[in-house]
Amino acid sequence: MEYRRLGKTGLMVSEIGFGGEWLERHEESESVELLKYAHRQGINILDCWMPDPKSRDIIGKAIEEDREGWIVQGHIGSTYQGGQYTRSRDVEQCRIAFEDLLKRLRTDYIDLGMIHYVDLEKDWELVSHAGPYQDYVMELKAKGIIRHIGLSTHNPDIAIKAAESGLVEMILFSVNPAFDLMPPTDDIEDYFENRYAEDLNGVDPVRVRMYKICEQQDVGITCMKPFAGGRLFDAGRSPFGIALTPVQCIHYALTKPGVASVLCGYDTPDQVDAAVGYETASDAEKDYATALAKAPKHTFTGGECTYCGHCKPCPAEIDIAMVNKLYDLAVMQEETPQSLRAHYLDLEHHAGECIGCKGCESRCPFGVKVAERMNRTKELFGL
């Protein structure tokens, strides 16, 4: 298993994580063993947004033998009222639910205290300004009950506001190639429409900006819904008209700036193996780019670099995807930060070494003018 730094939290999280949403569907002992099995495969981060007692009890029993070895995302505002999930900003309800989370998880702290499910502008205004809800979050942080503050959202406009606010250190965001086509919306159901608009093409510009801002602000991203609820595995339900594999979907998410871990849902150990298999998969098995570029519907053309690495190998041994990423981050700002310049200079090979063969362009499924970008990067960084 490979591990990545989760932004300014400094936590090293497994590239493949565990989304706990389906645990309640199985016998308790079966789900406890599933979590333990995932941990043995190197998975060390899990998300517990679910308020139901069964899911929380399962996680508590699974992690108690190695609590320090798990990084837990626990949500503030996911409550259980009248026997059902209710998102709430009522502090008393949030307190009851969060104290229940600690008790059932058999722990006295949560690594990532998540401001739960903020998709509406008015909700962002509520949680991001001083008031009872934010006071409660800050109280938990001051007491060390939560180690870091995060936020979950499906709306890239909200994610941008959160990343730029200084309030949060990481974001839980829905990342997959289908959702990335869509412009911002505050209704999650829009992402699951049977058909998308025919003029959608490539990653929506707001999402492109969101990923870059998270990387720029050092706000780490953990990914939910990487398979779009399984629809990307089914050509009939996929908006692209083709089926992708778990490995392709995971690689898509992990190539996005700021992304540290992909939280998959699992029913069986075989599904854990399929996700963890990403770590030993070949470049051909990870290649989502060719599949999307050749898809009959909604292809990812338009010349925007997705950092997929499909341009390799470079005869000058330039890491083209990384050079492109650093260039894109640099041009977002009036003046290139010294830290970003230092990162570029630390690369073993630089854009100025490009020989202009354009072999990379012939391999790029998305029509990126790599040679032109290398020239612009050389002019920007002087190397």
Image (spheres, rainbow, N blue to C red):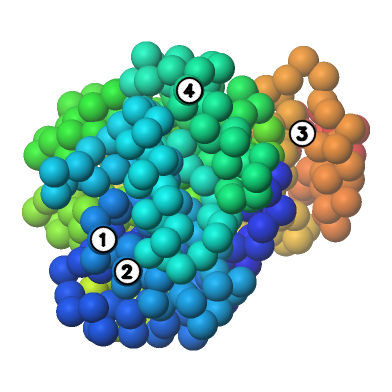
Q: Which residue is mark 4?
A: 132
Instruction: Give the SS element for disc 1.
Output: helix
Q: Residue at x 31, y 32 (%)?
A: 88
Residue toward you, 197 or 310: 197
Instruction: Name the residue beneath numbered marker 2.
Output: 57
Do the residues bearing badges 2 and 3 touch, measured as CB atoms within 8 Å?
no
Query: In front: 212, or 81?
Result: 81
Q: Residues within 10 Å of mark 2 (few under 14, many from 20)?
A: some
Q: Which mark is residue 53?
A: 1
Q: Quadrant of the N terminus?
A: bottom right
Residue 348 percent across, percent down from the top left: 85, 57
Whether tag 4 and tag 2 are in contact, CB under 8 A, the answer is no
Question: Which circle's residue, 4 or 1, is located before the other in the chain?
Answer: 1
Mark 2 or mark 3: whose residue is earlier in sequence? 2
Say which element carries label 3. Answer: helix
Gap between marks 2 and 1 measured at Cα: 6 Å
Q: Disc 3 versus disc 1: distance between alpha carbons?
A: 53 Å
Callout 4 amino acid? Pro
Return the residue nearer the eye: 259 or 140.
140
The kind of residue tagged 1 is Pro
Tell us which disc is closer to us: 3 or 4: 4
Relative image position of residue 270 (x, y in whole percent): 29, 83
Residue at x-position 29% and y-position 51%: 51
Question: Tag 4's secondary structure?
Answer: helix
